[in-house]
Amino acid sequence: MTKDSDFSEHELFVTEFPKQGFGIVDYLQGRVHFALLDQMKLMHTSGMTKDQIKETVLIRVSEIIENFEPEKDSKSS
């Protein structure tokens, strides 16, 4: 695969979230939202059903949450 074909595939499935005019929480939530939509678009294009997409995404998000270990000595709390 060439760099050009990699780039066009990324262009097809990766939506950039605008960086200007958003607070950090809104910016991070927007990036997650766009990433999920991009992933679901790719999954749909690859032939997955809506139910398969839902199950896969929920499993992955659950794994991320379950494996999250916040720093114990966080100064912001």
Image: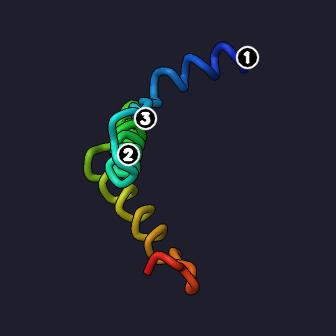
Q: Are marks 1 and 2 in contact (CB under 8 Å)?
A: no
Secondary element type, mark 1: loop
Residue denoted by label 1: 2
**Residue 28 image position (x, y, % from top left):** 40, 50
Query: Which residue occupies the extreme right position in the image?
Result: 2
Query: Which residue occupies the extreme left position in the image?
Result: 50
Query: Which residue occupies the extreme top position in the image?
Result: 4
Answer whether residue 32 is visible to the viewer in this image: yes
Q: Is 43 situated left or right of 8 in this image?
A: left
Residue denoted by label 2: 27
> Compared with residue 50, is residue 21 higher up or lower down, i.e. above or below?
above
> Upstream in the sequence, badge 3 or badge 1?
1
Answer whether residue 48 is visible to the viewer in this image: no
Which kind of residue does numbered mark 1 sit on? Thr
Query: How far apart are the two marked residues, 1 and 2, measured between alpha carbons?
Result: 32 Å
Residue denoted by label 3: 19
Front-lying residue, 33 or 6: 33
Query: How far apart are the two marked residues, 3 and 1, measured between alpha carbons?
Result: 29 Å
Q: Residue at x 33, y 41 (%)?
A: 22
Q: Are marks 3 and 1 in contact (CB under 8 Å)?
A: no
> Upstream in the sequence, badge 1 or badge 2?
1
